[in-house]
Amino acid sequence: MAQKPSLPKGTRDFSPTEVFKRNYITEVIKKHFERYGFLPIETPSFENSETLLGKYGEEGDRLIFRILNSGDFIGAVDEQTYRSKDASALAGKISEKALRYDLTVPFARYVVMHRNDIDFPFKRYQIQPVWRADRPQKGRFREFYQCDADVVGANSLLQEVELIQLYDTVFTELGLAGVQIKLNNRKVLSGLAEIIGAKDLLVDFTVALDKLDKIGVEGVKTEMLAKGIPASAIALASPLFSLHGTNIEQLEALKSLLKESEEGSKGIAELEFIRSTVEALGLKSSRLSIDVTLARGLNYYTGAIFEVASPEEVQMGSIGGGGRYDDLTGIFGMKDVSGVGISFGLDRIYLVMEELGLFPESLERSLDVLCVNFGPKEAITALKLVSFLRNAAIKADLYPTDAKMQKQLKYAHNRQVPYVILIGEEELENRSFVVKNMKAGSQTTYSLDRPEEFLQLL
RNA sequence: GUGGUUGUAGCUCAGUUGGUUAGAGCGCUUGAUUGUGGUUCAAGAGGUCGCCGGUUCGAGCCCGGUCUUCCACCCCA
């Protein structure tokens, strides 16, 4: 029986135009990744569950798509687990694989597994889809692409500087000018929690602080209280709520606030180095802003934290994020390997560029020349000309059947083909071809013996 | 996972307190147009009203469930 086709929630088909536009973005990103010395890798779309589970916190585990075992997966479950109706215990028995949730954890696994074949420091990039069992909303899908560039095996802060430049270079070339690259440091957040005496509530503290521009000072205080952070501690942290001024001024204020914390002071020193070095090198169109409230992202960051905000005129979450993680491969048994990386959110960048009308018009053109098909005999000659054009790197095609000219021209019109070539009986006889300029409506005749004269027009 | 929202022709949307045969614009097909698309004119095709169930003499409209869309929260690219 015929069933109405449909897509799973949060997934999309991409039309030819959309794919052209998406490719345009990824080509730009890829080009600059390679110019910065990153090497491409790919990893499987699914991993063993234990590789992924527990790496993204409780919330992350919930959002991981799990893959049902094959065969008689129920028969393999022991009676006790089966009867317990404990979803997570049962899931562990009937599912051993899961879809990739991000590109960083699979990369960490990759590094550990291939440690003997890799020359460190290893700079890799990876552009692949990831899956999250999230509820879709604006700019949020269950299948989406991340474009990651990470360096492992060296912990120079110059890498942070370079990654900021990389962000700037890519967004500038895409025409996404004036993007704000937010920078924070986990050590600063950690130091703050220490100073106010809430070190064990670091995550709750930072998650609440992150919402400052969204829910305001009172909202943040309320959330912190709800999470069990004492009022006295919140009072100590209050200078944070009203930080303002330039990056330098904010750093000065933080420096004095954190002078008692060794870790916090280290974080400040890192921020200061990155800030001053980036400033010395200069950015093309983006601006770097230090933001101590920035805490979003994965909780494995240990140093720098990046987030790229969409341009203000567009209502969209962040279009990129990243940071430094000193310990990631430690989970897989490889200690003391530091990594730092950034990610571009392809799907959101697409939406922002679409909204701002930043895609070049040339992407719309799928065909430069279409040859009208007048019949078997004319088609052979037309095909010769089409081959000639194709060899000259022109996107050319012959209409496959000798349908009515009206239909063929309408097809050319709908596909926005700028030039249509006509080779009918008459042209065949005097070895010529007619080129119709679809925009102007004008026609010019060329000799089949000198097709290169037409090439000059293109 | 929580709360709200949406679904009618290929697309964008009308559709009255529940009442015969569900409409429009755009698009599509055919013709005016035997070598010419866009403009015009004429004709035509296209819908189990997301799906399942319920209430009713009668449901696109009311009720329940479910899927989907979009939005907020959580979290995040």
Image: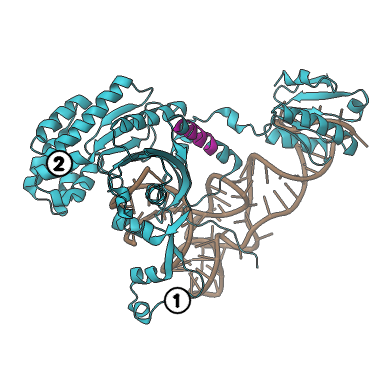
Chain colours: A cyan, B brown
| A75, above or below A8, in the image | below
Residue picked out by circle 2: A191
**What residue lies at 47% left-to-right and 38% top-to-bottom?**
A350
> Which residue is located at x 45 percent, y 40 percent?
A346
Quadrant of residue A325 in the image?
Answer: top left
Against A186, is B18 above or below? below
Residue A360, horizontal then vertical, whole percent: 54, 28
User: What is the chain identity of the residue bearing mark 1?
Assistant: A
Please state, as top left, top right, bottom left or bottom right, where the C terminus of chain A lies in the image. Answer: top right
- The answer, for residue A319, to whether it is visible in the render is no
Residue type highlighted by circle 1: Ile
Mark 1, secondary structure of its residue: loop
Q: Which residue is mark 1?
A: A74
The question of residue A26 being in magenta is answered with: yes
Q: Which residues are magenta?
A: A22-33
Q: Residue A409: give its label.
A: none
Residue A187, located in which quarter of the rendered image? top left
